Amino acid sequence: MTIRYDAGEVITAMVTPFNEKREIDYPAVEKLCKHLVNTGSDALLVAGTTGESPTLTHDEEYELLYAVKATVSGAAKVIMGAGSNSTRTAVDVTKKVESLGADAVLSVVPYYNKPNQQGMIEHFGAIARSTNLPIILYNIPSRT
């Protein structure tokens, strides 16, 4: 089954700016979001690989989602990285970001476990059953 999701024509994978204290730099996040929307981004991808997802805590990811949603205020869709090597964690994060207002989630094929085809079907099936959000599957062939 294929479900089409229209995120627009320009989807930008955001970096996550940090300050000198190695904390998320929220003023820089706001500035970046405004710049991306003003220069034509239809959707912003938050906490994907480009956005340092492996190094952020879940609380940081949720705070980042909140900040981006508040900044773009409907001017762009917000797609949230919610992937994990753990199906249970991916399901939990997906549920949480749905409750926080994400428009869609990006879910990576477990890159450490490297499941076979059936394992991927089970992993993504569990995520899909847990949410009403569109799920964008993210495959990194060199790692998965």
Image (tube, grey):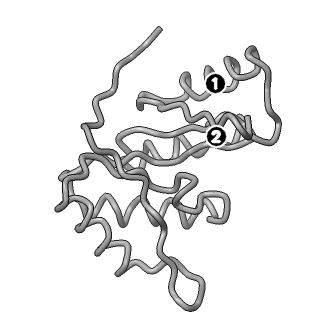
Tag 1: Cα neighbours inside 10 Å, few (<14), some, or many (≥20)? Answer: some
Write down the residue under mark 2. Answer: 90
Q: Position of residue 101 (x, y in %)?
A: 36, 47
Of 1 and 14, which appears nearest the observer?
Answer: 14
Q: Position of residue 11 (x, y in %)?
A: 34, 45
In the current view of this chain or complex, which residue is farthest to the front? 142
Depicted 124 relative to depicted 142: above or below: above
Amino acid type indicated by mark 1: Ala
Of 95 and 56, which appears nearest the observer?
Answer: 56
Which image quadrant: the C terminus? top right
Q: Position of residue 69 (x, y in %)?
A: 31, 58
**What residue do we see at 73% from left, 16% from top?**
117
Write down the residue under mark 1. Answer: 126
Under circle 2, the secondary element is helix
Depicted 80 relative to depicted 136: above or below: below
Distance from label 1 to label 2 (Cα)? 9 Å
Amino acid type indicated by mark 2: Ala
Q: Is residue 4 left or right of residue 62?
A: left
**What residue do we see at 58% from left, 46% from top?**
93
Tag 2: Cα neighbours inside 10 Å, few (<14), some, or many (≥20)? Answer: many
Q: Is residue 7 left or right of residue 60?
A: left
Q: Earlier in the sequence, mark 1 or mark 2?
A: 2
In the current view of this chain or complex, which residue is farthest to the bottom? 20
Q: Position of residue 61 (x, y in %)?
A: 53, 61
Q: Is residue 66 left or right of residue 91?
A: left
Marks 1 and 2 in Cβ contact (< 8 Å): yes
Depicted 15 relative to depicted 88: above or below: below
**What residue do we see at 74% from left, 40% from top?**
143
- Which quarter of the picture shows residue 91? top right
